[in-house]
Amino acid sequence: MVNECDIDELLSRWKQAKDEITDLEKKCNRYKKAVEKIMESNDTNVLKSKTLTVTKNMTEREILSKNDVPKDVWKYARKIMYPVFRFRNNQQQKKT
């Protein structure tokens, strides 16, 4: 049997890791925007340093929305099930 302290520690560590990932994604996006800005100002899709090279390529993806097609076509859509985990704080804030 798992005690509540173990579960609390597990969930706390997982939440902390997810928060760290979010922070790192934000940092990566800032770097990407800076690199993209340099590429645009130099009219290039390649940025090189002594040790690294970054290449920007455009890719294309087709998306179909339910609102884009007749109802009789949408019945052929595939449904995919996957788990979703959400965190929330259990501490209740008192209304004053």
Image (cartoon, helix red, strand yellow):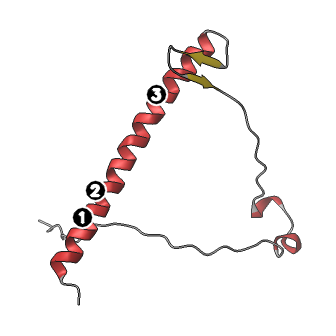
Nearer to us in this view, 21 or 54: 54
Nearer to us in this view, 9 or 69: 9
Residue at 17% in and 67% down = 93
- Please name the residue that numbered disc 3 is placed on: 31
Q: From the viewer's perspective, is 46 left or right of 5?
A: right
Q: Are marks 1 and 2 in contact (CB under 8 Å)?
A: yes
Query: Label 3 crowding class (10 Å Cα cut-off): few <14, some 14-19, many 20+?
Result: few
User: In this picture, is 61 found above or below 64?
Assistant: above
- The kind of residue tagged 2 is Gln
Residue at 18% in and 84% down = 3
- Please name the residue that numbered disc 2 is placed on: 16
Q: Are marks 2 and 3 in contact (CB under 8 Å)?
A: no
Quarter of the C terminus within the rendering: bottom left
Q: From the viewer's perspective, is 93 left or right of 23?
A: left
- Please name the residue that numbered disc 1 is placed on: 12
Alpha carbon separation for disc pair 2 and 3: 23 Å
